[in-house]
C-alpha cells in the first residue's frame, strides 16, 4: 500500500500548486546564481519532507497502538471509509461545526509566520518556509495522513508521508521556476482525477481490512496477524 503514497503525491501536486503555489511563487530566491537557487529550492523541499515525515511518524504510532489491540483489519476498513467519506461529503458539512473555528485561527497564525519568514533572506529561511508549508492543512495531506495511520507502523507511516511529499516535488519545483503555468482543460482533467484516485485508495484499504484472501491486496486475517507477530518478534 505504500506505493499509493507517491501516486497520490504526483496527482495531488496539481492541487498543491493551487493551494501552496502562492507561497512557492513568493520564495525569495537568488535570481543571479543558479547554484544558490538550486540549493534554496532543495532546502525548501527538505523542510516540507521533514514535516511530512514527522506527521507520518506520529500518526503511524497511533496506527501501531490500534494494531496492538488486534484492530489491524478494522483499522484498515475505517481508514478506507474515512478516505471515501471525506471525498463524497461536501466541505460545507464540516464547516458547520465549531471545531473548524480554532483550526482557522491556527491557519491564520501559521500564514502570518510564513509571511514574516518570506521577508527574511537568511540561510535557514527556505528550510523554515518548507517546514511551515508542510503544516498547512490540505485535503490531500489529510488523505496521506489516513494512509500513514493505516500502515500501522511509525516508520512505515513516516515513509508513506515522505513518499507523498516526494511525489509533489516535480510539479512544485516547476511551479517555483516558471510560475502558475497549469491552466486550461488539461489541469482541470487531472484535478478531477484526484478524488477518483483517493476513492480507489480508500477502497483498497477497505479490501485489505476485509481479509478476502487475495494476495497483496486483501490478505486473510490469519496472514495479517502472522505478519504483525513477525514484525514484533523482530524488535
Image (cartoon, rainbow, N blue to C red):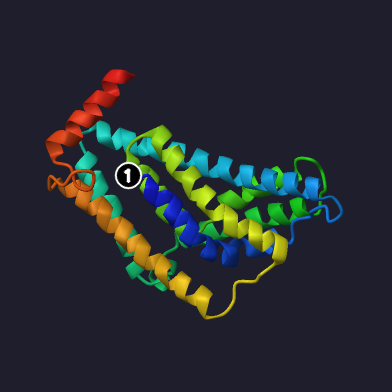
Q: How many marks?
A: 1
Quarter that holds the C terminus: top left
Q: Nearer the viewer, residue 94 or 22?
A: 22
Tell me: 39 left or right of 61: right
Quarter of the image where one finds residue 182: bottom right
Does residue 150 lie above or below 172 as drawn? above
Is any atom of residue 15 visible in this view? yes
Residue sticking out furthest to the right = 32
Can you tell which quarter of the image residue 98 is in? Answer: bottom left
- The residue beneath circle 1 is 150
Say whether residue 75 is left or right of residue 134. left
Residue 209: percent from left, percent from top: 20, 47
Q: Residue at x 52, y 44 (%)?
A: 52
Check disc 1: other Cα within 10 Å, few if <14, some if 14-19, many if 20+.
Answer: many
Residue 15: x and y in percent read: 52, 65
Does the image show residue 107?
no
Q: Is residue 230 left or right of residue 119?
A: left
- Relative image position of residue 57 (x, y in whole percent): 45, 36
- Give the left or right position of residue 79, taking residue 132 as reference: left
State the residue in front, 121 or 227.
227
48 relative to 8, above or below: above
Q: Residue at x 71, y 65 (%)?
A: 178
Amino acid at each position: 500500500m505504500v506505493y499509493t503514497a507517491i501516486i497520490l503525491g504526483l496527482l495531488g501536486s496539481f492541487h498543491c500548486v493551487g493551494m501552496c503555489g502562492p507561497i512557492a511563487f513568493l520564495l525569495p530566491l537568488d535570481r543571479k546564481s543558479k547554484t544558490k537557487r538550486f540549493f534554496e529550492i532543495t532546502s525548501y523541499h527538505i523542510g516540507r519532507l521533514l514535516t511530512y515525515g514527522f506527521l507520518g511518524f506520529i500518526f503511524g504510532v497511533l496506527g501501531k497502538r490500534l494494531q496492538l489491540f488486534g484492530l489491524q483489519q478494522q483499522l484498515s476498513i475505517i481508514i478506507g471509509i474515512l478516505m471515501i467519506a471525506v471525498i463524497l461529503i461536501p466541505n460545507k458539512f464540516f464547516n458547520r461545526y465549531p471545531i473548524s473555528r480554532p483550526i482557522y485561527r491556527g491557519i491564520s497564525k501559521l500564514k502570518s509566520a510564513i509571511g514574516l519568514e518570506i521577508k527574511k533572506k537568511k540561510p535557514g529561511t527556505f528550510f523554515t518556509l518548507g517546514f511551515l508549508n508542510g503544516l498547512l492543512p490540505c485535503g490531500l495531506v489529510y488523505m496521506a495522513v489516513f494512509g500513514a495511520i493505516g500502515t500501522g507502523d511509525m516508520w512505515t507511516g513516516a515513509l508513506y508521508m515522505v513518499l507523498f511529499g516526494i511525489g509533489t516535488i516535480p510539479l512544485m519545483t516547476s511551479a517555483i521556476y516558471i510560475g502558475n503555468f497549469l491552466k486550461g482543460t488539461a489541469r482541470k482533467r487531472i484535478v478531477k482525477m484526484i478524488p477518483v484516485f483517493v476513492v480507489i485508495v480508500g477502497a483498497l484499504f477497505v479490501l485489505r481490512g476485509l481479509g478476502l484472501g487475495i494476495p497483496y491486496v486483501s490478505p486473510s486475517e490469519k496472514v495479517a496477524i502472522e505478519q504483525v507477530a513477525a514484525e514484533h518478534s523482530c524488535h
